[in-house]
Image (tube, rainbow, N blue to C red):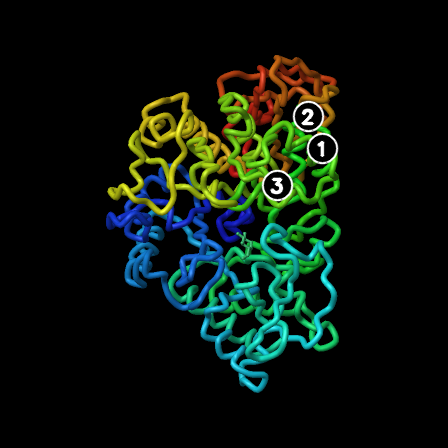
Amino acid sequence: MRLTYTSDLWWKNAVVYCLDVETFKDGNGDGVGDFRGLTQQIDYLAGLGVTCLWLMPFFPTPNRDDGYDITDFYSIDPRLGTLGDFVEFMRTAHDRGLRVIADLVVNHTSDRHPWFKESRRSKDSPMRDWYVWSDKPEPDDPEQVVFPDKENSVWQYDKGSGQYYLHSFYRHQPDLNVGNPEVRDEITRILGFWMELGLAGFRVDAVPFLIENVDPELADPHEFLADLRAFMTRRKGGSILLGEVNLPYRDLLRFFGEGLGDQLTMCFDFIGMQNSWLSLARNSARPLMNALKDRPRAPKDCQWAMFLRNHDELTLDKLTEEERQEIFEAFGPRKDMQIFGRGLRRRLPTMLGGDLRRVKMAYSLLFSLPGTPVIFYGEEIGMGENLDEEGRLAVRIPMQWSEDGGFSQSPDTVREVPEGSFAPDRVNVADQRRDTDSLLRWFQLLIERYRECPELAWGQYTVLDAGDDAIFVHRCDADGATVVVAHNLCDTARDVELRLDGLEHCDLTDLLVDGTLKVSADGTVKLALDPHGCRWLRASPPELPPEDASVMSQ
Ligand code: NOJ
């Protein structure tokens, strides 16, 4: 096996599972999820096959933005447990071979953080410059306001000290001034602290906002990211930064560290995600094909992180108004399903009308797209949302473990699960473990195959024209090994003919179901796809068993 494909660059083909400790499993019966509960469920996660857990914020918080408003970066929210519980959790996760990363939310703090309390005390406070203050703020650009339902400005007047402070998000989340070297040092210390407790890296919240406060006259804003990454690598090789950077591709490369790849290790592919949804709405491969063709190559050793849903709204902000409306119409026509005018507060299976075949196809697409898949807890069993919960919390509902919920012994839980066809008696882990056709089993299979096909994540990918708009086909080539993947976005069966240059005479072995196809002498092959069908095909020369044709066998 070539050294490249060892786990040195583990993030290249990791399977990342995002969860919120608060809603995953309650271990002490008080109705709130906690580290003890999570620790009990680690074998479930290991069995699913995921390789890295991403924990949403678990720090002390007044909880006015579901934990993204922090009052102490060096401890655990008492509702979720103690530092002791955290260490036990880390120890168990490592024992089962799982890496753990956590949200790093340092663009802002809670306004109740002692740093802000000190900073707002007076203009002469020694911590005044830790935040961004102004006598006369710049006029607001409506584009800058991230939560337009609650805020109409990013500046808030502070009566006590007579100046305005910047808050890119809610007014109770003042922005830290990372232009200040003391703030940078403190952020670095936070990273060091949690790495010492075993974290393999961080999902960095709101990266463009984080560095925008650095005055480019004084320092290169991107140097801060490079410094953080260098610090982490010094402390522990192979630690990563996974960045939330929702920007057009052309602006994104800088965040990896153009050419060098020395800043964010991975960036979420927001453009690919939004175009996947447009493809699903239109039953047409075109939008996704175009996005992947436009997508720049991540620098060597960096990677794109692929996702369909996350803990926030399904943001459609990078599409045109008409495209957005098409998706609203297809997947969230009611006003109460929409949010901020730009997104949907729904989970994937409800948007796809609970059509299991289509849901399975969508996840097959996710796991086969070039990059590292990131899933949100509950996606593996097809959980729905609860629109009775406020705003984005609709998708952050308790994990559905069993028929009666199984999240907590308490009748009074942190949030409510939905009623109806997505209620726990219809959608839960226990039932799906016993059902070989379940979505959970499908996820296990996809994860297993994804891990066995490093070509998908590592390879050079090419989007192929199948001559049929409804069919999305791509191939991934790495060091002479090839995997070809086809998806039928529509609900009728299709036959397509593909041209596979360089694979003349090869066998194509179906990795999801049994069956082999032969590529003809002129490099073409006919492929049949069921309604919403998907096929992952490994190419092998006729004299070689398919399992020996993997890049892993070289
Ligand atoms: C992005 C996070 O994903 C979101 O949930 C949060 O509200 C904002 N950043 C502010 O931290």
Compared with residue 61, is residue 541 higher up or lower down, i.e. above or below? above
Disc 3 C-beta below 8 A from ligand 1: no
Separation of marks 1 and 2 at Cα, in angstroms = 9 Å
First in sequence, mark 2 or 3: give its number: 2
**Circle 3 SS class:** strand
The amino acid at mark 3 is Gly
Q: Amino acid at mark 2?
A: Arg
Q: Which residue is mark 2?
A: 282
Label 3, label 1: how far apart the Cα atoms are: 18 Å
For image coordinates 60% across by 50% down, the residue present is 149
Tell which quarter ligand 1 is in. Answer: bottom right
The residue that label 3 is drawn on is: 343
- The extreme front residue here reads 159
Residue 122 visible from this viewpoint: yes
Image marks 1 and 2: residues in contact by CB distance under 8 Å: yes
Residue type pointed to by label 1: Pro
